Amino acid sequence: MGGKITALRLQKRNKERVNVYLNGEFAFGLTALEAMHLQVGQELSEEEIARLRARDLVERAYQRALHYLSYRPRSTAEVRTYLQRKGTPPEAIEEVIARLERVGLIDDVAFARFWLENRETFRPRGKRGLRYELRQKGIAPAIIEEILTDYDEEAAAYRVALARARRLPKDDARVFRKRLYDYLARRGFDYEVIQTVVTRVEAELADETIPTRRGHEE
């Protein structure tokens, strides 16, 4: 069943959107640009109403996705899952995803690089840990391996180990080594890397505690 447009009103909170009223009742919203093609008194067929409502659904989902992306970059899978939780129909989700990809707001390669750089700076992880996190974000294995190609896991492990080691009690060497080893393992570092780094850190800390010859003489 069709309907007659009885009012076109700018939304109070968003002047770029227009509320469309059919037969005296609110029917759907549209962008101001789309609403320019409508006028009060115009008759709309059932098919036209369905098409405009679908456009409204996609636009609202798009705006919702933009808000979600405003906090930090997201993977395609994260955006898709978020819209699914909001009850967005599958066809609308895919249209929103395609639109976001076209304007460069979602890009899984760029997202994976962002995630790696963020982890390197604030919470370093090993390749094993990074692979797990990126898989959880829905990043394809090929992309994960590409961005990890030049990742210096040993350097990252060393920074983490040295910072942690300075805060651990050192009265029992065996306990100290185990705690440091476990700490790095929980952060996804490779076991061989851990072994190398823990040995290096132990040696460096031991050197720091050895008094100089001059100190003995004094």
Image: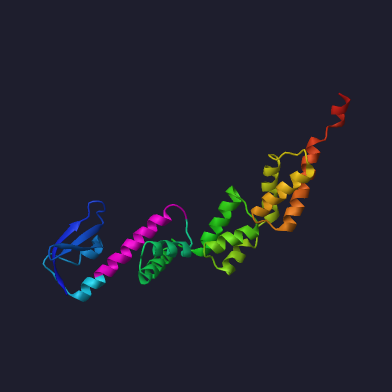
Q: As rendered, which of 49 and 38 lies closer to the eye?
A: 49
Q: Residue at x 62, y 51 (%)?
A: 124
Overall secondary structure of the magenta stretch? Answer: helix
Q: In this view, does 173 lie above or below 42?
A: above
Q: Is residue 14 above or below residue 142?
A: above
Magenta-colored stretch includes residue 62: yes
- Whether residue 213 sits left or right of residue 197 in the image: it is right
Relative height, residue 186 to residue 53 (above, below): above
Question: To which quarter of the image does residue 92 belong?
Answer: bottom left
Q: Residue 145: horizontal and vertical position, in percent?
A: 62, 66
Read off the magenta span.
52-72
- Residue 191 part of the magenta segment: no
At a point 18% along the width and 66% down the height, the residue shown is 38
The answer to which of 87 and 131 lies nearer the viewer is 87
Image quadrant holding the C terminus, namely top right
Instruction: Examine the image and state in which quarter residue 21 appears.
Output: bottom left
